[in-house]
Image (cartoon, grey):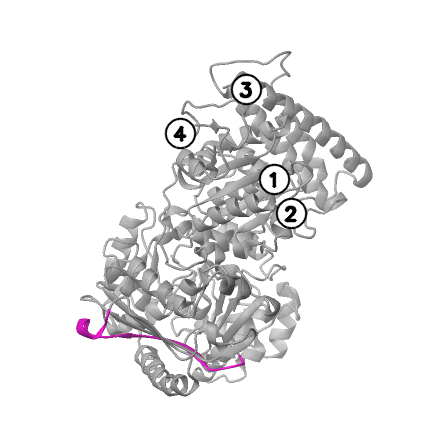
Amino acid sequence: MSKIILSAAIRGAHQIHDRVQKRLDEALEKYGEKQEIGFPNTAYYLPIIYGMTGEKVERLGDCPKIMRIAEDLLPPVPAENLWTPYLGPGLDAGMATLFMEEIEEAIKYVDGPNPVDGIWLGAADDVIMRERGVEFVDGTAPGFCALLGSAPDGETAENIVKELQQKNLYIWTSANYNGTTVAEQLAARDVQLGWETRIVPYGREVSSVVYSLGFAARAAMSFGGAEPGNYRRVLLYNKNRIFAFVITLGTVTDEWYANAAGAINYGFPTIADTDIPEILPTGVCTYEHVVSNIPHDQIVQRAIEVRGLKVQITEVPIPMAYGPAFEGERIRKEDMYCQFGGNYTDAFEFVEMKEMNEVEDGKIEVVGPEIDDIEEGAALPLGIVVHVAGRKMQEDFESILERQVHHFINGAEGIWHMGQRDIVWTRISKKAKEKGFKIRHYGEILHAKFLAEFPAIVDKVQVTLYTEEAKVKELLEIARAKYHYRDEKTAGMTDESVDIFYSCTLCQSFAPTHVCVVSPERLGLCGAYNWLDCRAAFEIDPTGPNQPVEKRGVIDELKGQWESINEFVYQNSGQSVERVNMYSMMEDPMTSCGCFECIVAFLPICNGVMIVNREFTGETPCGMTFSTLAGTVGGGNVTPGFIGIGKVYIGSKKFIRADGGFLRVVWMPKELKELLKEQLQKRAEELGVPDFVDKIATEEVGTTEDEILPFLTEKEHPALSMEPMLA
């Protein structure tokens, strides 16, 4: 390790130690040892400390022990620039730095200044971590950049960040230089910050770097099956699975060096725009550890090369930047040039299969006014009609492709889209109009993305965009008739009506033993993949994560267990799961990866189950919050009495059928109950209990079994008179 970097990292770690020790002493004197500390809504305590040591920091009184661990790691401050042929002392100083800064950031939540302030977001809770974790699984987010300091000017900062966004990377900003930060430079240029746009301003001080590395540690424990305290597995998981790197903009201080050394432990290299000493030999990182003096217009590409990150980008011929990072961008009314749909005009999108000779590939036509023909603030009707053709295209794939229109259009900078089918609402910003964006560019986006994302089934794409009111109304009726036809076609599908289920192992990159089995009546627990989606995915990519699983050799029809499914799950779970009951949560339930929309948990006193969705952060009757439950149920675990599910599965006839089914539900958050009210009511009426939904308790009734039991008794909830769930 360079003697300058090594000595600077050690000096910086000692400076951080002195500051944090003073802060901790003051907090202990002011609040006492029993004062609770931590990051809000996470089951991982202080995640770097928890992941590396297994120690649960829950109170101020737990911190002195961690400080002693950090002190044991800290090498003495060298009298002069120290050189060694290995990285050990610097890496130890870096890890000690992360432990101490995590304590410092946790104290801020008690004593201030609160890390969540203005544009600063502080620690990501487990809901965000699991939602965003899906993107690391499916490749839409190939990695992240921890961006420290500030650029020479706002334009340079925006150019660097926009290039990172176009590479589909997350940008997590920390630290200030010359009195400002990249996040503040972007905010001054009206660039939207937040998880939605993948620009995440964790904090203004360098210590907020721990939120980035804590996220990485949680990913290893939650999705990678790493046990808390198994530091080797946590670090190797990050080196091999989480493709992250650090970019520093500005003078690298001793404390920055100490944090960079901490990141190197994870296999995350540092790329700097200043002339600092380099560490080029490989070792802990995949390639170089520190690379310096990189020009701003080359720094993103150089960082990607150093980290060994493979980024695939589809060129979309529009005058705006394009990538998933722009999907969360909002176009406010004052920033809008024109809009379509919503409550203002008719708007729809419709994908239809045609024969090969009926589609002219690349033909894009606007029927009606173009953007240059309308005034600022106008609202036009819009019909997006996409005709596709392919030798392997099937009618059943139309709806699969149609659902992608939302994501594809939203990927354009300066364009906002929501809804699907005939409830579309989309806006074009003034900024996009100024740069030359036309209505026809909607078609350019769809043509490029359908061909790039679905090459196995789509050979030709033709797009017609209708903005003429009479024509939109005419075609809208045709589209609605087709929507209804599709719904009727799939509504009657049951598990008994098919001979093949489908697997989904997409999340095995995070949860190696997890195997989802998707059937017509049980969608994937992430809520994103149903049986038709998986069938289409298999047709598109026969070697992908969605494989057909023949349904043969019934073992228990009620519980939903078959010989063939057991064999498939056993082989594809690394021979760790021998049996799966599709319709039971009490006996050999399906594994859960961590991407589930909801968790179902057994409540013994109430003889029923509660369901909690990830958006609900409060306490639940099983005594655990969603995040705590997720830490237990996820990671590819089989946990009798607990399962992860997709929301739609609650209304399925196969919902925990072997355990009593839908009538076992005794509690769920009010928000979830309202969201699914129509679906829940329909299922209740099918079962002959039309007032059942009113019998389900919410947090307004109580958040413990003792609190909700009187309500259930008064309402004569069916679960109370059913056979005991726990035999």
Q: Look at mark 1 in the image and give the residue it sits on.
A: 150
Report helix, strand or loop for mark 4.
loop
The disc placed on residue 435 is none
* Structural crowding at the residue carrying mark 2, measured as other residues with C-alpha within 10 Å and reported as few (<14), some (14–19) or many (≥20): many
Residue 350 magenta? yes
Asked if labels 2 and 1 touch by Cβ distance under 8 angstroms, the answer is yes
Q: Amino acid at mark 1?
A: Ser
Q: Is residue 359 left or right of residue 36?
A: left
Please report whichever mark, 3 or 1, sits nearer to the chain's N-terminal start. 3
Q: Amino acid at mark 3?
A: Pro
Residue at point 69%, 31% (across, down): 64
The quadrant of the picture occupied by the C terminus is bottom left
Q: Amino acid at mark 2?
A: Glu
Give the x, y percent position of residue 54. 55, 36
Q: Is residue 374 above or below residue 186?
A: below
Please report whichever mark, 3 or 2, sits nearer to the chain's N-terminal start. 3
Please report whichever mark, 1 or 4, sits nearer to the chain's N-terminal start. 1
Q: Is residue 716 left or right of residue 485?
A: right
Q: Look at mark 4 in the image and give the residue it sits on.
A: 287
Camera-side mark, 2 or 4: 2
Q: Name the one closer to the observer, 589 or 437.
A: 437
* Structural crowding at the residue carrying mark 4, measured as other residues with C-alpha within 10 Å and reported as few (<14), some (14–19) or many (≥20): some
What whole-number distance in Å separates the C-alpha atoms at marks 1 and 2? 9 Å
* Structural crowding at the residue carrying mark 3, measured as other residues with C-alpha within 10 Å and reported as few (<14), some (14–19) or many (≥20): some
Q: Report the magenta residues as a range.
A: 343-360
The disc placed on residue 89 is 3
* Structural crowding at the residue carrying mark 1, measured as other residues with C-alpha within 10 Å and reported as few (<14), some (14–19) or many (≥20): many
What whole-number distance in Å separates the C-alpha atoms at marks 2 and 4? 32 Å
